Image: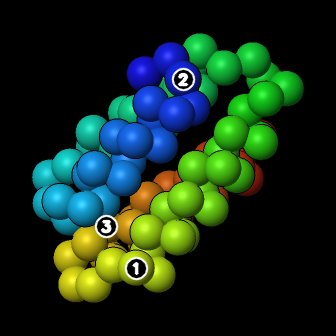
Amino acid sequence: MPGLADCVSLLRLLIARGDPQGIPLAENAIEQYLAVTPAAARGRGLCVLQLDARDQHVAAVGVQRSFAETIDAYIARKLAEQ
């Protein structure tokens, strides 16, 4: 999961599925992205991920919406750590 675009794509797919068992996969994708991203770029990348998750949240319903909220909250925690 080296690139931001790859991470965004995977998160969109997981949100669309809305399967709560996919949450660890989403968190792992974010962690992998952070691991390969230079420290100076992590905050911007997390903001991109968060904005996309919020866009998905607006368009989603039911379990997809809940999944997007969970991802948004996880990214917010990661941003607070930066």
**Label 2 vs 3, first from the N-terminus:** 2
The residue under the point 50% across, 56% down is: 74
User: Does 77 sit above or below residue 3?
Assistant: below
Q: Foreground: 20 or 12?
A: 12
Badge 3 is on which residue?
67
Residue 23 shows up from this direction: no
In the rendering, which numbered label is found on residue 30?
none
Badge 1 is on which residue?
59
User: Does 80 sit above or below residue 7?
Assistant: below
Mark 3 is on which residue type? Phe
Image quarter of the N terminus: top left
Q: Nearer the viewer, mark 3 or mark 1?
A: 1
The residue under the point 43% across, 59% down is: 71
Position in image of residue 79 (x %, y %): 70, 50
Q: Secondary structure at mark 2?
A: loop
Q: Nearer the viewer, mark 2 or mark 3?
A: 2
In the rendering, which numbered label is found on residue 3?
2
Q: CA distance from mark 3 to mark 1?
A: 12 Å
Label 2 crowd bin: few (<14), some (14–19), many (20+), radius 10 Å = few
Q: Is residue 73 left or right of residue 47?
A: left
**Label 3 vs 1, first from the N-terminus:** 1
Q: Secondary structure at mark 1?
A: helix
The residue under the point 59% across, 15% down is: 36
Mark 2 is on which residue type? Gly
Q: Secondary structure at mark 3?
A: helix
Mark 1 is on which residue type? Ala
